[in-house]
Amino acid sequence: MSEALAQQLCIALIGNPNCGKTALFNALTGSRQKVANYPGVTVERKEGIFETPGGRRIHVLDLPGTYSLRARSPDEAITRDTVLGQLATEAAPDLVVCVADATNLRLTLRLVLELKKVGRPIVLALNMFDIAERRGIGIDMDALSRDLGIPVVSTVAVRRNGIAALLRQIDRLAPESGSNGPGGWREPSAEQVRSAHGDAQRILDACVTVPGHPDIWTRRLDRVVLHPVAGILILLAVLFLIFQAVFVWAAPAMELIATAFDALAVAAQAWLPQGMLRSLLTDGFVSGVGSVLVFLPQIMILFFFINLMEDFGYMARAAFLMDRVIGGVGLHGRAFIPLLSSFACAVPGIMATRVINNRRDRLATIMVAPLMTCSARIPVYTLLIAAFVPHRSIAGFVNLQGLVMFGLYAAGIVSAFAVTFVFRKRVWRGASEPFIMELPAYKLPDPRNVLMGVLLRARIFLRRAGTVILAMMILIWFLSTVPGAPPGATDPAINYSFAGMIGHAVQPVLAPIGFNWQIAIALIPGMAAREVAVAALGTVYAVGGGKAGALGNTLAAHWSLATALALLAWYVFAPQCAATLGVVKRETNSWRWPAIMFVYMMVLAYTAAFIVYNVTTALGG
Amino acid sequence: MPPAGLVRSDAPGDEPCADIVQLGRGARGIRGTVVQVGAETGALPDCVAAAELERLLLEIGFVEGAAIEILHEGFIRGDPIAVRLDDMRVALRRREADAILVRVAGGSTHAAGSES
């Protein structure tokens, strides 16, 4: 082995969930992190680089949290296979750093005993050591190190304490490593787990003294937070705050981005000569980039709250409270955050499904998230409702327009639950994953970690999903613009484009649901974002200036009530959003799931519009 | 309930009021000691296999001898439950908790392993 290679070292961070492993990873690597997916699975691979005082360049992997090498989820399988050196794409680690929550050592000790069977050098990092000291927990590190037969260091990752000691141990152990062949480990039986627990308990008794009064604050807080009435009220308040933040706080930033890119497009138009290139750059590229960036404020605000709740320890409590409420249809307790966020926009909502570990639970949530009524549907709904639903009250106080709006929202929620039910009980039959989850002690969130997490999500969205979305936006621009209108044309230019041709071609298929060719055409640019369909209808009907009132009157004159209601029903279900499909591709790491989503939503949309159109027509609409 | 022979009864200080219950049937506030993990639950077929559930429970710390207390319950049919398990807290559904047998320390305030 060459000298340079000998200086390179691969280490893996492993530990129970909530042990502060990611904080330690951040402390070790700073911003030198790379996030990708493991090939073929949806599990995120986090790698970082740092140098030790001994001059070694270290590649460090942040493995998904686990209680055991025995894997149930794809995340845990990645952890197991990496440690054992069984991943074809991954070099076996030279050294394993096992991270422990110093206030809660029992399960980590058992994991260490299991890891020792693998036969790689291990360092045990007792993280959150300051909290353990404050609580009066006494840990005899020398005895612990002797009993376990591995070096033990204490760290406070959020304050970068103890990192130097950890690096010294890595340097010290580095020469011992090198035989990073396949690890020796066999799945322990229940009896072996029991006996390991016994060993861990003996070590704990010998090395750790716990004061009589454990974590009083967590107990006191839980009395309120997990209270059947108060807990639900707190949860609703928290959810309301998040919803408000994603919906309202993000709006000024989103408007700023939209305005800036509009201005950029106008400026570019002034500089460039008239023609296809100008249209590509301004209408395709600039507005395409703008339509990607416009999601950033919502994504960052949502992940700010998610990271805050995870760090604080509230996420597990919220899942506990929601488990029975949405568990009945087969959704995981944690699915409520992605679903709630999807009312603002399905893109951050789908990204937020990463709080769900189980793959099937996560996929089920991703598949139904776009059924939640996102804010982009509102312009379409308000336009059609204002134009077609009479502004009058029924039963004296219920506004009919409001009632229709409510019905559209309710239809989205009910269908989401119904689709989940079908997915979980019919498509993925078999054992449902047990809900067994540690409720970690409450901790003050560390601002630096929360912020790094938010920036990480923003970066992932821009690099991975952004490219897919931008490509789709340019494709939609191409379809709606090329070929251009012939000289002397009187109809709107879009009528002569591929979108126009497609619109005319598919119109016979859409006739049974009451859509004319103008609607068929508007649906194609409407793939860029649902609200774009409003502008597209304005273009097709040549109602300029984006005056919703004028467009509404035009539509009321041209469409029957049945057509309008059918289009509303269509918009409840139709996958009219390229960005959503793009982010599903990124999150599931394959085109299979966006394809399935597209097809099932299309079928639902067509069926719903068909029923609404024919029933309304039969009733004389 | 399994036959009594499956239940370990060699715990010291076998109090006369001590009683063995399935954790999933326990009321909020009960305290005691885990006497068996992986008991027959008679659960629905969509549950994971009993042997798998046993190991899952063991891995998160439900082990014979552990001190346990039901701290909280959900607001729909008291499900799921949150329990104190030695010095950590774990949430689980009652359905899965049925695989854990607990010797209840008969309402006494000096129950073993309690924090008071």
Image: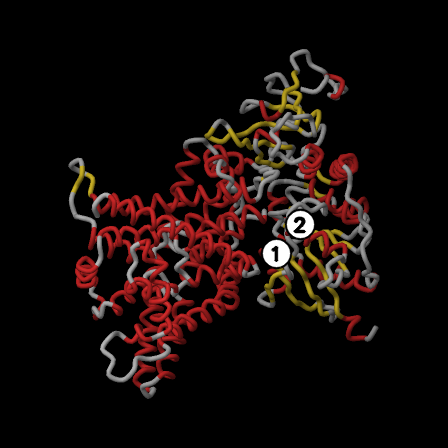
**Local crowd size for mark 1, using a 10 Å CA cut-off: few (<14), some (14–19), many (≥20):** many
Of helix, strand and loop, which one carries label 2? helix
The residue identified by callout 2 is A76
Corner quadrant of residue B12: top right
Corner quadrant of residue A204: top right
Residue at mark 1: chain: A
Residue A314 seen in render: yes
Q: Nearer the viewer, residue A423 or B52?
A: A423
State left or right for residue A531 relative to residue A171: left
Q: Which mark is residue A43?
A: 1
Q: Is residue A609 above or below residue A546?
A: above
Q: Nearer the viewer, residue A397 or B70?
A: A397
Residue A433 screen position, x and y as percent? 60, 40
Farthest residue to the bottom: give it. Answer: A273
Q: How many marks?
A: 2
Residue occupying image coordinates x 19% and y 57%: A556
State left or right for residue A368 relative to residue A608: right
